[in-house]
Image: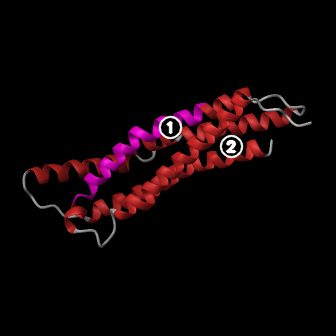
Amino acid sequence: MATIVPSAVRIAAAIGLSGSAWCSGAIMSITFTAGSALLEPSLPAAAAAHASIIWHHIYNKGKTTLPPIAACAALAFFYAAYNFPNPVALQEIENTRNSLALAGVLTVSIVPYTLLIMKPTNDALHAKSRAVTERSKKGFETILDDGTKELIRNWNVLNFVRGALPLLATGLAAYAILFS
């Protein structure tokens, strides 16, 4: 006998799936488009010299946008996990609830990942951005140094991994919903 899933649980699951997929896409697109564009050899010297400042602005946009969406998606997954109806097989409900709850944790884990794993790289890029800004204010010319390039390369890798977290959540939740 098939389990009848209430509309509210279906809507919550859809919000969780949409939010986690959106977060993953947004994070990974930053890596593949903006992050790689900052390292493009054909980038004009004036723009390349300010790569850390451009990165700083991209980071701030993501910092204000992504955590609230990840939190909403996680809350939706948690709601769906808690309210998923009891089917005939108790093991089935536990697997579905655990998968949805884990999807919520994976989605919102972009925040602690950023604060713990990415912090040294982010702090170094913020420092580079401040230094370039100060040099520019004083009228000094700035060039894109190898240290900044390496930090941006490292940030791109870390950011890709961060983007994989909500992608894993999307896949896990989709599997739990489709095959429960």
Mark 2 burial class by Cα count in 10 Å: few <14, some 14-19, many 20+: many
Seen from this angle, which residue lies furthest right? 1
Residue 23 x/y as whole percent: 52, 46
For this view, does 51 lie left or right of residue 111? left
Span colored in magenta: 50-75
Residue annotated with mark 1: 69
How much space separates mark 2 and mark 1, taking CA atoms? 17 Å
Q: Is residue 124 magenta?
A: no
Residue at (38%, 58%) from the top-left corner?
34
The residue sitting at 29% across, 59% down in the picture is: 148
Q: Secondary structure at mark 2?
A: helix
User: What residue appears at the point 65 percent right and 33 percent down from the top-left corner?
Assistant: 12
- Quadrant the N terminus occupies: top right
Examine the residues drawn in magenta and state their main secondary structure.
helix
Q: Residue 173 bears which disc, if any?
A: 2
Q: Quadrant of residue 152?
A: bottom left
